[in-house]
Image (cartoon, helix red, strand yellow):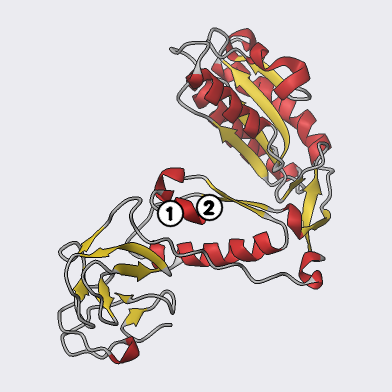
Amino acid sequence: MNASNCILLSPADNVAVANGRIEIGTALPGGAVASALIEPGHKVAIKPIAAGEAVVKYAQAIGRATQDIAAGEHVHSHNLVFESGRLPVVPPSEAEHATEADRARTFMGYRRADGRAGTRNFIGIVASVNCSATVCHSIADTANRTLLPKYPGIDGFVPIVHGQGCGMSGTGDGMMVLHRTLAGYARHPNFGGVLMVGLGCEVNQLTLYGQKGVAAGKRHFNIQDAGGSRKSVEKAMGVLAEIAEEVGQLKREPIPVSEIVVGLQCGGSDGMSGITANPALGAAVDILAGVGGIGILSETTEIYGAEHLLA
């Protein structure tokens, strides 16, 4: 429910969010009247909340009132406390059941050799170590400038770089996570082809990925073997042209909507993203999940306090 001065995110909520400055005496949803000045983005009670009662926003308990709060009062840290693990659990609402017509819907995507589907047809340039990151950026920039115009079936050349790969143990959790992450990029269905670029003397050697494993079918070389940065960019242009000849011929085809996987990642939260983008994406993923698709919450630290919604 949206009023001209505030937003009620769910009918189950007992607070609303001011979308502008609310002056004392302003009418609120449900017949309440503001008894305090409410700044944009702040909460205002739209019904009485007794001391110890849950404050509900997004149809979920976000804390408890530390004192009696009258309808129209400002709700903030002065009268609200968060108690991890002690808040009443409000069962998540179920998404609407999809119809057979919904499940039969398709999107135009790329069917990959491993059976998965991509929504884009990029070529990736993956760095094995931070020392090859600059060269990978140069390779991608040069390829996007000189090769991409020749291949309309390719969406672009994307550098995948990071700050690790050397100055670290060759075993343990750090290297395991790096291997797993780079393997995920190398196998990503939005990449029709991948070129892996190393320096040559790093801990995270390209040979560790194996031609029968992650690197199967992936072209790769080391900068030191190529003769330096400039020669590496020149060498990469030849390799990428060969990859592009094949990848550029791939065509989109109808693929069941149930095969869509959406990755959700914070793009830089502001004071309003929690009441604009986040609920909208949540509703969209509910629809997607209803037809068998998948949503991935990548920033798991921001799920603190909402673990029960994922159970």
Left or right: residue 201 compared with residue 54:
right
Q: Position of residue 140 (x, y in %)?
A: 60, 34
Circle 1: is it few (<14), some (14-19), or many (20+) Cα within 10 Å? Answer: some
Residue sitting nearer the eye, 31 or 221 = 31
Q: Position of residue 36 (x, y in %)?
A: 15, 80
- The answer to the question of whether label 1 and label 2 lie on touching residues, with beta carbons closer than 8 A, is yes
Residue 56 vertical placement versus 73 (above, below): above
- Which residue is labeled 1 in the image? 306
Q: Quadrant of residue 52?
A: bottom left
Residue 233 seen anywhere in this rendered image of the structure: yes
Q: Residue at x 43, y 82 (%)?
A: 1
Q: At numbered mark 2, what does the secondary structure look like: helix, strand or loop?
A: loop
Q: Position of residue 64 (x, y in %)?
A: 27, 64
Residue sitting nearer the eye, 209 or 99 = 99
Q: Residue at x 16, y 78 (%)?
A: 37
Q: Position of residue 214 (x, y in %)?
A: 71, 24
Q: Residue at x 20, y 81 (%)?
A: 70
Q: At numbered mark 1, what does the secondary structure look like: helix, strand or loop?
A: loop
Residue 18 seen anywhere in this rendered image of the structure: no
Residue sitting nearer the eye, 164 or 221 = 164
Residue 177 vertical placement versus 57 (above, below): above
Q: Which mark is residue 123?
A: none
Q: Residue at x 58, y 30 (%)?
A: 181
Residue 108 vertical placement versus 220 (above, below): below
- Which residue is labeled 2 in the image? 310
- The type of residue carrying mark 2 is Leu
Left or right: residue 1 compared with residue 203:
left
Cα distance, mark 1 to mark 2?
7 Å
Left or right: residue 173 compared with residue 183:
left
- The type of residue carrying mark 1 is Ala
